[in-house]
Amino acid sequence: MVAWIGVDDTDSLQGMCTTFLAAEIVRELTTDYDLVGYPRLVRLNPNVPWKTRGNGAICVRFGHGAGRRTLIGELEGRPIWSHAWARGDDDVWRLRARVSTLVESRSEFQEPTTNPGFCILSGQPAASLYWNAVRRIVSKEEALAAVRSPGVLREYKNGRGIIGALAAAAWRPRDRTYEVLAYRGESRWGTPRVLDPDSVKNMDRSFASTFNNYDYECDRIVIAPHSPCPILFGIRGDDPGVLPAALQTIKGESPAGWIVFETNQGTDDHVIPAPTLEPRTTVQVDTQVLGLPRTIRGGHVVLEMNGLEAVAYEPSKGFRNIVRALRPGDRVRVVGSIRAQPKTLNIEKLQVLSLVEESRKLANPLCLRCQKRAKSMGTRAGFRCARCGQRFPHSAAVRELVSRALEPGWYEPPAGSRRHLSQPLSRRLDRSRRRAAA
């Protein structure tokens, strides 16, 4: 039997990290239990208003290990091994006191927005709970109703964390990525991180299966968080086998320990494929551009679509130039979140499906009778010959086609402006190539 341990909402903007608590649980329980599979970092709906940072919950599984084992980390100088599966039977209630002690000692209880919760179950909750929690707002009652096996359910304060804890345990991956997280020694928490940018760039170029490592447009490291949490850095990728080697190439502050997590990051699991305008969801919309993009105060770019305005915000940097290059009549597929007030679609990435022809006017139409150029009668009102009065439609102007600054295809913001769950185009392209090769 496998004990499924889910934990959420233990951190705050002032410190801690739920993934560090996962490492503490692994360190504590692997003294007499075996870790089964990779620890899991499960990102949930990024539009939840009460999230701390990336809205991530964790799930770790323990039992009596069997099958092939894999080195997936090192904590306090001790190697951490993961087993392929578990055998035998055990009582999940035996783990309650030890997990409670860790959660209570490592949670930011003094913060009013921190509301921890954890579960220890003998089986996974219903799979629908994960999909609801990654795409919409889930109530505590809905989360508890998804439990399908006996076990421990523990809530603290308002208990909101039990929702994420159960949703993380409910995840059955259709797609997955991995992240190796390097931890800092506790004496360094809250101090500036020291990482060599050139080593991050070299790692990015050397390990093709990793992604979102360095923002070349803004010239900054993306693998390191900006909060005073215990994480030194994290490297994400599709191949868990190369992540420990990638970690070793980063120069600067030495990690106190590390663990490879299985994650839903970079999968687009949060995107609802059917068009909907439900606030606090992330949707994919195929639509036509109706008006010229406009730049508003703050440098944000607004795109008028059918019944909705889409916005590329200033932090997306050069991506805004892609949006600015769109013209009325272009067809696009936009992925983004629905903001409640004002109701807008915040662009996460977009695909140009088709482009209209764009032309520029060279001259007014020629009156063949008078051999003179006609005069404009106003915007889109056509032309009239000043000598004989002959009228010409607006379309009679002499024009030439101009090349568009865009081509059909996908476009995304720089690495430092992407959401954890958003699938980078490098992954999308690589998966398409693998499918084609198969």
Image (cartoon, rainbow, N blue to C red):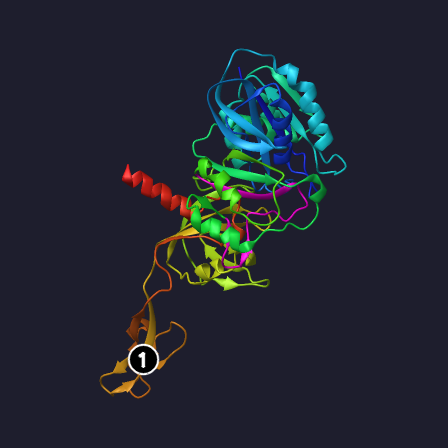
| Span colored in magenta | 213-238
Q: Position of residue 366 (x, y in %)?
A: 26, 82
Residue hosting label 1: 363
- Vertical position of residue 60 compared to residue 219: above or below: above
Residue 188: which quarter of the image? top right
Judge whether residue 149 is colored magenta. no
Q: Residue at x 39, y 44 (%)?
A: 428
Residue 227 seen in render: yes
Which residue occupies 55% across, 50% down? Answer: 222
Q: Is residue 324 above or below residue 137?
A: below
> Quarter of the image holding residue 232?
top right
Q: Nearer the viewer, residue 97 or 329?
A: 97
Residue 200 x, y percent position in the rendering: 52, 51
Q: Nearer the viewer, residue 432 or 292?
A: 432
Position of residue 260 relative to residue 310, above or below, is above
Q: Secondary structure at mark 1?
A: strand
The reply to whether residue 265 is in sight is no
**Quadrant in which the C terminus is drawn:** top left
On the image, the x and y values in percent for residue 148 come to 55, 17
